[in-house]
Image (cartoon, rainbow, N blue to C red):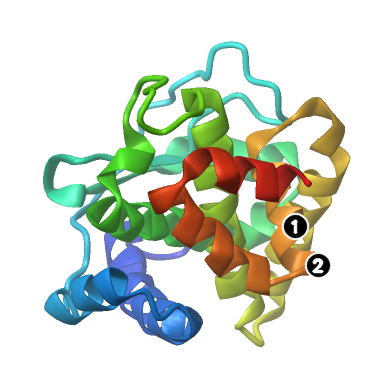
Amino acid sequence: MFTYNVDSFLENELVQIREIFYDFMAGFTDKSFCKMLGERKEWLPPVYISDEVIVIPKANGPFDKQLGKSIKKGYSVFIYYEAVKEYCCTFHLENEYESALSMVLAHEFFHSVHRIWDEKAFLQDASPRTGISMERKHQLTESLADYFAYFWLESHEDSDYAIVAQHRKGLWQEYASANWPYSSALVFVNSPEIFFEILRLLKSNPAMAYRKLSS
């Protein structure tokens, strides 16, 4: 269980997550994305921790509390550490609490950078311009962010990170039939090259991105 200051831990993790993110995204050569990254090379999102516990209405997955969120204002990140504690207790990951926090931070970091580049992907409507509902856009964005978080966990030799990575992958598999949005990250585990294609299509043709992810 956690042994020191949560803020300090997340601050240190975030710098490392950014480094892995740049390595991870090296294969994505979209000009506008590369330009955005170049302009924000040293940028990190403001991270706020909260003990608030937010219940997700009509949740169709294994856990009905919000673990974190990314918001447009300042492209900030919120980590709900009490909910993460409950998550760990639910799935017997008490000894991996730090790694679970890190997973949530990596997930939300990806959302923040993605939002800077493609705000359209996060519009809260079923826009005719995007051709798909918010529910389907949610599936696309969440699967991308969760796969990056999985990649981040897998990049560590620390066994606690590996345990959480395999746990998360197991949830994707278990709840795929329930249409849990995060479960679509399994597509990228099996075919990592599709990740960048979905990311590109989500900006240019979201309906086609959804078809590609679902095929």
Q: Where's residue 124, x and y in %?
A: 34, 24
Q: Where's residue 42, x and y in %?
A: 17, 80
Q: Looking at the rendered structure, which numbered label has been put on residue 55? A: none
Residues tagged 1 and 2 counted as in contact (Cβ below 8 A): yes
Q: Residue at x 49, y 80 (%)?
A: 24
Count of numbered badges drawn on the protein: 2
Q: Residue at x 81, y 67 (%)?
A: 190
45 left or right of 121 in image: left
Is 172 placed above or below 8 here?
Answer: above
Looking at this view, is 151 or 188 the one in front?
Answer: 188
Q: Residue at x 61, y 12 (%)?
A: 58
Inter-mark Cα distance, 1 to 2:
5 Å
Q: Secondary structure at mark 2?
A: helix
Q: Looking at the rendered structure, which numbered label has been put on residue 190? A: 2
**Looking at the image, which residue sits at the far top?**
58
Q: Looking at the rendered structure, which numbered label has been put on residue 187? A: 1
Looking at this view, is 30 or 49 the one in front?
Answer: 30
Kindly identify the amino acid type of the residue bearing the numbered disc 1: Val
Q: Secondary structure at mark 1?
A: helix
**Which quadrant of the structure image shows residue 166?**
bottom right
Q: Classify 10 Å Cα crowding around label 1: few (below 14), some (14-19), many (20 and above).
A: some
